[in-house]
Every structure is written in structure tokens, then in C-alpha cells.
Amino acid sequence: MRWQVHSEQALYTDRWLDVRVADVELPDGTRLDHRLIRTAPGAGAVVTDDRGRVLLLWRHRFITDSWGWEIPIGKIEEGEEPVAAAARETEEETGWRPGPLRPLLYTQPTNGLSDSAHHIFHADRATHLGPPADTWEAERVEWVPLADLHRLIDRRDLVCGTSMAALLYLVVSGGGGRARS
């Protein structure tokens, strides 16, 4: 059952997002206007260490007025490769340079509303460079035990969909993740 798109029209556009309305036809012939958001792709990293910990940011999200743990992630700049963006975002947001990054997970976290695409990589080590360059990104940056994931999710201290998907995937794939092409 594929929906047919007859047209799309921009409602609002800036450098971060493009809000649109699409004229779509459902398989039963019904036509409706459906809102959607187009965004640039993002890249992030799950960085672990040899002590079973993961590098996370504790940050506030004003939209939901909530605090939570997240992996470093951000926009892929024009002409930038996803792996380079993941390394850059990790350094800027945490002050740690990830070791060699390997593909971990590709996700479309809100595909019923947005074309947002996230390329997530894994590194099993990092080098501390100093304080984060983007001091406004997080209240704090910490190495959090992977064994605490269940508790963090239960307490709603980990609610970001991409962060949760990446961390749970890492755990179910054996803790080190498997490279994906």
C-alpha cells in the first residue's frame, strides 16, 4: 500500500528545516494534505571505552522541557562525509576525539513526519583534548556504564530516540557493534 504524492509545497524554509505540505493520495483513493519536515542528514557517534562505559552528554531540551543523556550528534555539513561529521560533532560537543569510527546504525527516527536521516558510528576508544568547544551543548559530559542503560531508560533519563536506538543496538550486537556498509 503505497501513498502517491501529487505535489509538495513549502510552507516555511530556513537553513535548518523545510516545512512542507504534500498532496497525497491513499491507496483507497482518498486525498489529503499531509505536513512534513525536510532536514539535512545528521551524524553521531557511540564512543565506548575498555571499562564498559559510553561517552554521553547530559543536556536540556527546551522543546520538551526535559533533561536526558544523549550521544553526540549533529548536522552533516554540505560536502562533508558522515564519518567526518560524526568525529567533528563528538570533538565539538564532548572534548574527546573518537578513535577509528566504524558504521554502527542508520536510522530515520521520525519517518512518518520527517525525512531526517541519522548515520551513527562506533569507536571503542577516545583521546581527551580538553573542554568541549561547544560549551552550550551540554550541562556535563560523562562516561556512563553501559550496564546502567536499562535503569536510565526506566527513569526517563534516556529518551532521545536516536541515542536509545544506537545504544541498544550496540548492546544487542555484542557491545562492540558490527560494521555496516
Image (tube, helix red, strand yellow):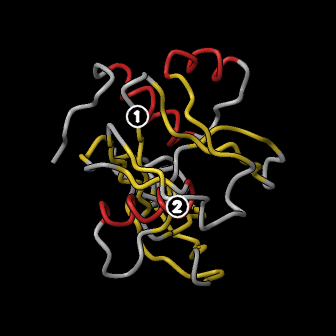
Would residue 117 appear left or right of 17 to someone viewing this image?
left
Q: How many tags in the picture?
A: 2
Could you tell me residue 66's position as x and y percent?
80, 42
Q: Residue at x 53, y 64 (%)?
A: 92
Could you tell me how far apart the alpha carbons at marks 1 and 2 are, in whole angstroms?
A: 48 Å
Instruction: Choose between 55 and 174: the one closer to the eye.
Output: 55
Q: Is residue 50 left or right of residue 68?
A: left
Are the residues at dot 1 and dot 2 in contact (C-beta closer than 8 Å)?
no
Q: For mark 1, give the secondary structure.
A: loop
From the viewer's perspective, tell me whether residue 43 is left or right of residue 133: left
Q: Label 2, on which residue? A: 31
Amino acid at dot 2: Arg
- Image coordinates of residue 110 in percent, x first then y, are 52, 49
Mark 2 secondary-structure assignment: strand
In the rendering, which numbered label is found on residue 62?
none
Residue 51, placed above or below residue 78:
above
Q: Quadrant of residue 135?
A: bottom right
Residue placed furthest toward the right: 65
Picture coordinates of residue 87 (x, y %)?
Answer: 38, 60
Residue closest to the eye, 21 or 23: 21
Dot 1, crowdedness within 10 Å: few (<14), some or many (≥20)? many
Q: Earlier in the sequence, mark 1 or mark 2?
A: 2
Image quadrant for the N terminus? top left
* Residue under label 1: 48
Give the residue at the far left of this rendering: 181
Give percent across and percent down for residue 20.
58, 74
The amino acid beneath tag 1 is Thr
| Foreground disc of the pair 1, 2 | 1
> 1 or 151: nearer the eye?
151
**Dot 2, how many residues are within 10 Å of its Cα: few (below 14), some (14-19), or many (20+)?**
some
Q: Is residue 113 above or below residue 79?
A: above
- Residue for point 35% across, 40% down: 125
